[in-house]
């Protein structure tokens, strides 16, 4: 299936700093990408839908000024956690649909584990 | 909210078939049934999806009831590597519609 990559896979930062996470679709173009967050022993929670060339749509309860999303190209979306705090420590996962694929499956990246000290 | 109901956990003996049920009684006519799994600390892995007909690929088979209100994912010969959380998700075919995850079923394959 199609490949979605994320970078970095793991990051540790100090409280108050900002962290950028990159999500790339490696072998397909994705006009829409999705960002999820997963806390320990819980399911994935959708944070936002990222559309290439336009503003992201955030789910209720997700602060758009804290979680900045940029989808500058058909293969790259970035999530920046601004002024990170320990409660932002989580597993962040991006996803994209291969609109050109036969099944239109939604493929997921390997995730980025953020630890805020 | 997730539109599916799955058992919290299941066990399966290695080498046997694992049958994971899912109820989706409120599924709409244009919604697909997707199955993903997540191995600890990794991103979800696509398994299979279907609309009405039963589907089979190299990983699994998907059996959808005629009324589409429930489905079963079948792993024909479970191995220890199949131990994971399995998510049944119903969703649209639109590229702009994200998949919404429920709590899934934790499958433990036992030697």
Image (tube, rainbow, N blue to C red):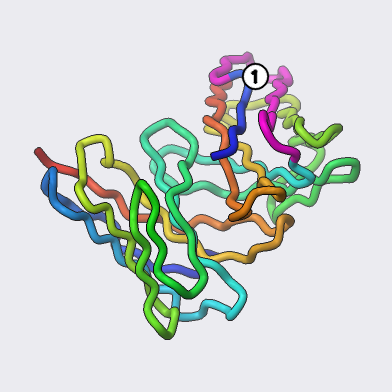
User: Is B21 a magenta residue?
Assistant: no
Q: Provide the residue span drawn in magenta.
A: A9-29
The image quarter containing residue B62 is bottom left
The location of residue A99, given as percent across then percent down, is 71, 50
The location of residue A70, given as percent across then percent down, is 82, 34
Residue B38 higher or lower than A3, as above or below = below
Report the side of A15 relative to A73 (left or right): left
Q: Nearer the viewer, residue B92 or A101?
A: A101
The image quarter containing residue A86 is top right
The N terminus of chain A: image quadrant: top right
Residue A115 higher or lower than A39, as above or below = above
> Would residue A90 be seen by someone viewing this image from the given angle?
no
Report the side of B12 relative to B3 (left or right): left
Question: Residue at (58%, 43%) from the top-left corner?
Answer: A107
Q: Secondary structure at mark 1?
A: loop
The location of residue A33, given as percent across then percent down, is 71, 43
User: Is A13 a magenta residue?
Assistant: yes
Question: Residue at (45%, 54%) from the top-left corner?
Answer: B48
Report the side of A83 relative to B76 (left or right): right
> Would residue A87 be seen by someone viewing this image from the given angle?
yes
Question: Residue at (71%, 48%) from the top-left corner?
Answer: A100
The C terminus of chain A: image quadrant: top right
- The residue where tag 1 is placed is A15
Q: Nearer the viewer, residue B38 or B18?
A: B18
The image quarter containing residue A95 is top right
The answer for which chain carries disc 1 is A
Residue A100 higher or lower than B25, as above or below = above
């Amino acid at each position: 299936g199609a490949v979605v990559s994320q970078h970095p896979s793991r990051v540790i930062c100090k409280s108050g700093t900002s962290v950028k996470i990159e999500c790339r679709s490696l072998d397909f173009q994705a006009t829409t990408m999705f960002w999820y967050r997963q806390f320990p022993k819980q399911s994935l929670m959708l944070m936002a839908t990222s559309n290439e060339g336009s503003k992201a749509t955030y789910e209720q309860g997700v602060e758009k000024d804290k979680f900045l999303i940029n989808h500058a190209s058909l293969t790259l979306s970035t999530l920046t956690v601004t002024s990170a705090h320990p409660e932002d420590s989580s597993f962040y996962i991006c996803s994209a649909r291969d609109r050109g694929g036969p099944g239109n499956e939604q493929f997921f990246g390997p995730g980025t584990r953020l630890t805020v000290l | 909210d997730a539109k599916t109901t799955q058992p919290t956990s299941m066990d399966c003996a290695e080498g046997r078939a694992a049958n994971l049920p899912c109820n989706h009684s409120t599924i709409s006519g244009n919604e697909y049934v997707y199955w993903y799994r997540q191995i600890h600390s990794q991103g979800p892995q696509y398994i299979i999806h279907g609309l009405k007909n039963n589907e089979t690929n190299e990983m699994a088979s998907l059996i959808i009831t005629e009324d589409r209100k429930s489905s079963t994912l079948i792993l024909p010969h479970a191995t220890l590597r199949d131990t994971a959380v399995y998510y049944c998700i119903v969703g649209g075919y639109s590229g702009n519609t994200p998949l919404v995850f429920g709590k899934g079923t934790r499958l433990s394959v036992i030697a």
